[in-house]
Image (cartoon, grey):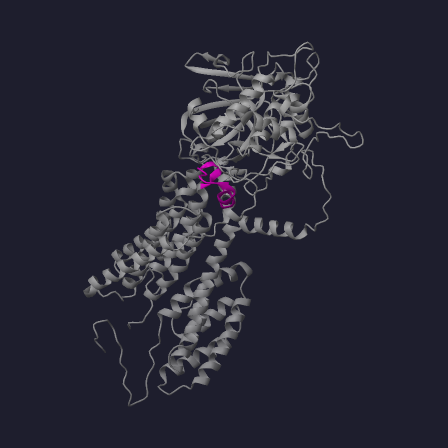
């Protein structure tokens, strides 16, 4: 055997098992370093390790099984299928198994779906995503298949074929980077470690590593690692993450203002229990929606494109990242009849939301701590929230705090009365917190309360510019939380205070003040809070430095009901300039929804003639590409096999002397016969007869090519290069006829077989040289010749 000979079969190299284990250990280390990009995506290192480590180990074991001829290829595919569709689902959907080991029908079916859908889940959910909906199947699939592909070439007898292990490893790095996040200090370290392990392993594998110069090699490796790591810290990072370019299907502008329907809860369900919450801390508000965009008609939602302190509504997994400080809690919410809306009731800052059913998809805004459930809440909906109740600052802290500076959508068509009254009340305050407190206290003390329902003092609904102007500059300051919250938020904006309106449930007493008496204790240290339609309220939040968003409640006591004999005029009327009478031809009125938005019923607000074909086309294309990601893996495997075979065939066609190339041509025919399942042994004449007989074809062409190969090998006469080229043209024709004679499935299996690579690279005919020439063969690295 010469120095350049290839081994006969994957792993049949005569190399000790120790070399295989070293190569596979290096592959496992590099694969885990690549997959570590997904640790902060899952948010649970233990759960990530429970899927990534077994997947890579099983992939290496299946690759190692290829060293046994009886277990090669087809048995390896069986092992891969078992690991992918049985072992993987048991880990990803362990809660659906029997005794956490035996998979059920639900386990297998959900595992199959997650194999194709887990990749989309990773980019459509805001990290940390947890382990819900089989998300671990993504890291399991990549770890298993890419480790297997890298492993089978890492232990190949031909050291140079170890280079084929690099593409699967590089693919793992690239895919995990695209599915990962744009932050994380560990990425430069993992990338540098990956590169060092790869360089050292390949140098050792290709016998290029000079152990005698290990000191200089170590110095070079350390310097390279330091430069690479330092460069990543100095150069601004701009990573491409698919999640940042994924367009979520939810748009907050498609939803009408929730504040417009606040009075309907009080009118239709004043005493009905709409929401029951177990173990909610006493005096804790439950929010439904947060609005920071006023267009003159209604308060509505915005997103990160308009407000710096409002993020997008994004799908979240079992974990939600939050930096809020306060008191942790775990509460169970149950929706009752009457609460049917798209706003999901939540308290505080959520850290996780777990639905009892698996079909409830919701979108969470991490900056406003509010959520939307597109399917809508319904009677019997039950979910458990784990979160943080923010610490309430003291009055002294609020009065000393300055206003934060953030960008918000500019309020449109604000009445002059808002600015005049805000300036007269809080224009001289020393801090933003003191100004906000003055606004809330003045409205609460000077105003009167009325829902405007039957039997109440007259009070119009709405919170737009006309209704707010009537509240502040009219003959009577009468309204409910809808008007007072809108008025205070607009007044705060006029003073330069960041403000937003919150709508939700408050555990109120008869006066409308927050009370811990609404929280009832039950047996077993559990508490229950029942919220009725009368508890649906609006309040205001102001952003203060070092305190965050602070809640203010400007609505007067609900027992402060006016009558006709009382003075209901707004405070300090001498500072207000009365507005001229409203013209009858163009009256101001509150709109039911913002201009240009769509209602929940799906009616279009504005006609849009834009051609939507291409956006829909690219959206469908992206979905098909994402859902078809496991198909890419299968295509990559097939492509690698076909590439390796094509390279081996091209090398046999062009490498060596003309005599060697002719002999290799017959090897190509023999290889194709063996990979198609034909048994052909003995001399070339015997092989030709066996191939023709089992293919049921004319043996003449096979016999002729066999005689020509024998002549070139044993005659000792020189063969010209053009004769070898002509011989290979005949070989190509015969190979095509052999493939055409096979059934379709057998033909596909033949094309994907790696036996041809083994035969073409492992055999070299001994060519008799003409007299007078010498034949020298190198048999080992020690330099001995024969």
Query: Can residue 237 be seen here?
Result: yes
Taking 635 as reference, is 170 left or right? left
The quadrant of the picture occupied by the C terminus is bottom left
> Residue 211 falls in which quadrant of the image?
bottom left
The quadrant of the picture occupied by the N terminus is bottom left
Look at the image and say whether residue 121 sits in the magenta stretch.
yes
Vertical side of 179 occupied by 4: above or below: below
Give the tally of numbered discs: 0
Vertical side of 779 occupied by 235: above or below: above
Q: Position of residue 519 (x, y in %)?
A: 48, 14
Q: Nearer the viewer, residue 274 or 389?
A: 389
Q: Nearer the viewer, residue 224 or 578?
A: 578
Q: Residue furthest front?
A: 574
Q: Residue furthest top?
A: 565
Vertical side of 557 occupied by 715: above or below: below
Taking 715 as reference, is 239 left or right? right
Q: Residue at x 35, y 50 (%)?
A: 33
Q: Position of residue 92 (x, y in %)?
A: 44, 39
Vertical side of 751 occupied by 511: above or below: above
> Residue 197 falls in which quadrant of the image?
bottom left
Query: Can residue 344 be seen here?
Result: no
Q: Position of residue 280 (x, y in %)?
A: 47, 20
Q: Nearer the viewer, residue 449 or 710?
A: 449
Taking 113 as reference, is 766 left or right? left
Q: Residue furthest right?
A: 585
Q: Residue at x 28, y 82 (%)?
A: 775
Q: Which residues are magenta?
A: 119-135
Q: Nearer the viewer, residue 569 or 735?
A: 569
Look at the image and say whether residue 14 sits in the magenta stretch.
no
Q: Position of residue 169 (x, y in %)?
A: 39, 56
């Amino acid at each position: 055997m010469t120095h350049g000979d290839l081994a006969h079969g994957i792993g049949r190299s005569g190399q000790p098992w120790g070399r295989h284990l070293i190569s596979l250990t290096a592959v496992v280390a590099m694969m885990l370093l690549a997959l570590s990009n997904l640790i902060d995506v899952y948010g649970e290192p233990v759960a990530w390790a429970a899927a990534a480590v077994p997947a890579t180990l099983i992939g290496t074991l299946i690759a190692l099984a290829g060293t046994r001829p009886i277990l090669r290829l087809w048995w390896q595919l069986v092992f891969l299928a078992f690991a992918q569709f049985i072992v993987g689902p048991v880990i990803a959907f362990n809660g659906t198994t029997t005794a956490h080991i035996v998979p059920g029908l639900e386990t297998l079916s959900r595992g199959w779906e997650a194999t194709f859908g887990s990749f989309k889940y990773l980019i459509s959910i805001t990290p940390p995503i947890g382990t819900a909906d089989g998300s671990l199947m993504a890291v399991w699939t990549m770890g298993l298949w890419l480790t297997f592909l890298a492993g089978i070439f890492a232990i190949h007898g031909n050291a140079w074929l170890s280079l084929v292990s690099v593409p699967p490893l590089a693919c793992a790095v690239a895919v995990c980077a695209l599915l990962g996040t744009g932050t994380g200090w560990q990425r430069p370290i993992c990338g540098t470690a990956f590169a060092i392990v790869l360089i050292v392993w390949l140098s050792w594998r290709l016998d290029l590593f000079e152990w005698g110069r290990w000191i200089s090699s170590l110095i070079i490796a350390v310097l390279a690692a330091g430069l690479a790591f330092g460069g990543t810290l100095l150069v601004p990072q701009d990573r491409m993450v698919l999640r940042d370019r994924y367009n979520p299907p939810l748009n907050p502008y498609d939803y009408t203002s929730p504040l417009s329907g606040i009075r309907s809860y009080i009118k239709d369900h004043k005493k009905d229990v709409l929401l029951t919450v177990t173990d909610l801390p006493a005096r804790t508000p439950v929010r439904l929606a947060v609005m920071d965009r006023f267009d003159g008609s209604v308060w509505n939602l915005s997103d990160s494109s308009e407000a710096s302190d409002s993020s997008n509504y994004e799908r979240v997994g079992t974990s939600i990242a939050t930096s809020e400080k306060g008191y942790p809690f775990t509460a169970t919410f149950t929706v009752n009849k009457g609460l049917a809306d798209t706003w999901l009731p939540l308290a505080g800052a959520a850290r996780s939301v777990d639905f009892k059913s698996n079909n409830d998809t919701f979108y969470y805004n991490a900056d406003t701590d509010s959520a939307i459930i597109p399917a809508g809440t319904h009677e019997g909906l039950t979910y458990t929230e784990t979160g943080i109740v923010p610490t309430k600052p003291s009055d002294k802290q609020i009065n000393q705090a300055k206003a934060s500076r953030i960008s918000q959508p500019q309020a449109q068509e604000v009445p002059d009365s808002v600015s005049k009254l805000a300036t007269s009340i809080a224009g001289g305050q020393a801090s933003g917190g003191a100004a906000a407190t003055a606004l809330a206290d003045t409205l609460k003390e000077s105003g009167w309360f009325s829902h405007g329902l039957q039997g109440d003092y007259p009070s119009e609904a709405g919170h737009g510019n006309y209704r707010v102007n009537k509240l502040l500059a009219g003959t009577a300051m009468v309204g409910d939380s809808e008007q007072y919250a809108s008025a205070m938020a607009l007044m705060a904006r006029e003073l330069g205070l960041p403000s937003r309106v919150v709508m939700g449930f408050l555990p109120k007493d008869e006066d409308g003040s927050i009370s811990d008496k609404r929280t009832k204790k039950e047996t077993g240290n559990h508490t229950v809070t029942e919220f009725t339609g009368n508890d649906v309220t609006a309040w205001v939040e102001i952003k203060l430095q070092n305190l965050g968003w602070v809640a203010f409640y400007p609505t007067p006591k609900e027992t402060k009901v006016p009558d006709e004999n009382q003075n209901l005029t707004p405070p300090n009327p001498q500072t207000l300039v009365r507005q001229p009478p409203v013209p009858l031809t163009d009256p101001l009125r509150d709109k039911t929804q913002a201009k240009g938005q769509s209602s929940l019923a799906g009616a279009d607000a504005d006609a849009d003639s834009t051609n939507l074909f291409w956006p829909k086309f690219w959206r469908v294309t992206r979905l098909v590409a994402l859902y078809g990601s496991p198909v890419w893996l299968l295509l990559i495997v097939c492509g690698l096999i076909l590439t390796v075979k094509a390279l081996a065939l091209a090398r046999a066609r062009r490498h060596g002397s003309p005599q060697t190339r002719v002999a290799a041509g017959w090897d190509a025919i023999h290889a194709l016969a063996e990979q198609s399942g034909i048994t052909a042994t003995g001399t070339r004449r015997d092989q030709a007869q066996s191939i023709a007989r089992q293919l049921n074809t004319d043996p003449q062409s096979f016999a002729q090519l066999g005689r020509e190969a024998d002549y070139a090998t044993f005659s000792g006469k020189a063969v010209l290069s053009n004769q070898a080229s002509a011989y290979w043209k005949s070989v190509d024709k015969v190979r095509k006829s052999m493939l055409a004679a096979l059934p379709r499935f057998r033909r596909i299996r033949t094309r994907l077989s790696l036996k041809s690579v083994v035969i073409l690279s492992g055999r070299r005919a001994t060519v008799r040289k003409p007299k007078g020439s010498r034949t020298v063969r190198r048999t080992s690295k020690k330099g001995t010749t024969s």
